[in-house]
Amino acid sequence: MAAVQKPRIGIDLGGTKIAIAALSPNGSLLFERRVATPKGDYAANLSCIAGLIDEAETTVGKAASIGIGMPGSLSPQTGLVRNANSTWLNGKPLSQDLQQLTGRSIKFANDANCFALSEAHDGAGAGAACVFGVILGTGCGGGVVLNGKLLNGSTAIAGEWGHNPLPWPDDSEMPPPVCWCGRAGCNELWLSGSGIERDHGVRTGQYLSAEAIYAAALSGDASAKASLERHTNRLARGLASVVNLLDPDIIVLGGGVSNMAHLYEQLPDLMASFVFTDNFITPIVPPVHGDASGVRGAAWLWDE
């Protein structure tokens, strides 16, 4: 499909914030805004997104394409949202409601897919044949881009490694905690920022943010350092299982956890013993566009 030669609007519908950006045809930023997500209120989410689109269109006009990155995905069978950790969206006709409310055609994709698409398009994975984009924030998501195109899968769940079980668990990780999805031991419970917080709290009785735990570790706090060591080992196992299946050319980490510099130093060596190869060489890198990758990837959906 030929590239869309008009402005693009991208929206990142997150659990804590809704971000919007408008890009020119060459990818330069024309407009951006962020607001807090109305948690638990589906109708307020619709109104908020419609209002942000109106704001962006005052700058770029109504000819702009619109893409939305969202938690979970739209079921190909029903068109309803499923698998979203923003649980107030689940079972709702988000696509139908927003297109009716705005009178606009809108493309939707999982937020981790949008992140991966952005970094494959003009970010850290540009030029790579197979990019695995990872979101490690409140949740744990992933997206796969092959030769510049998103891999969605026959049921639109490609890349959902966050709800595979943590591989090769040790005794300290058993019995596994129960996930919001109803299963136990999901990667999301261990590898996300909230997973770091939960594990640190269980071990120490101190329930701190992942950022605070990271800062404490850098300051020499032994319990915080131990929590990050456990997390890095678990992340290495989780990513190794993806490499064994997909063998990507590059892995790009996103979300708040991607700001933890030790991951890029330690993960390759830790992963090597779990990857089924004699020479593990896959680069693991931070994103070029940072936390703007989700909204930028949503804007690029119309080039799919």
Image: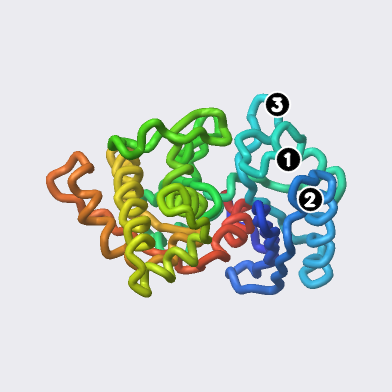
Which is more N-terminal, label 3 or label 1?
3
Q: Are marks 2 and 1 in contact (CB under 8 Å)?
A: yes
Could you give the CA–CA distance between mark 1 and mark 3, rounded to whole angstroms? 17 Å
Residue 8: image location, x then y, percent: 68, 61
What residue lies at 84% left-to-right and 60% top-to-bottom?
Answer: 51
Q: Residue at x 42, y 66 (%)?
A: 214
The Cα–Cα distance between marks 2 and 1, rounded to whole angstroms, is 10 Å
Q: Which residue is mark 3?
A: 78
Say the numbered circle drawn on residue 88.
1
**Amino acid at pointer 1:** Trp
The residue carrying pointer 3 sits among few (fewer than 14), some (14 to 19) or many (20 or more) residues within 10 Å by Cα, namely few
Identify the residue shown where x is 40% and y is 57%.
Answer: 252
Relative horizontal placement of residue 183, taking residue 77 as reference (left or right): left
Front label number (3 vs 2)? 2
- Marks 1,3: beta carbons within 8 A: no
Q: Is residue 189 visible?
A: yes
- Say which mark, if any, is on residue 263: none
Q: Give the answer, above or below, for where 273 lies relative to 79.
A: below
Tell me residue 74's x, y (percent).
Answer: 65, 36
Q: Nearer the viewer, mark 1 or mark 3?
A: 1
Q: Is 221 displayed left or right of 139 in the figure?
A: left
**In screen coordinates, is 190 left or right of 247?**
right
User: Relative to residue 208, is residue 85 depicted above or below?
Assistant: above
Residue farthest to the top, as pictured: 77
Q: Is residue 116 visible?
A: no
- 85 and 202: which is toward the camera: 202
Q: Nearer the viewer, residue 71 or 58?
A: 71
Contact between marks 3 and 2 (CB within 8 A): the answer is no
Label 2 sits on a secondary structure element that is helix
> What residue is disc 2 on?
45
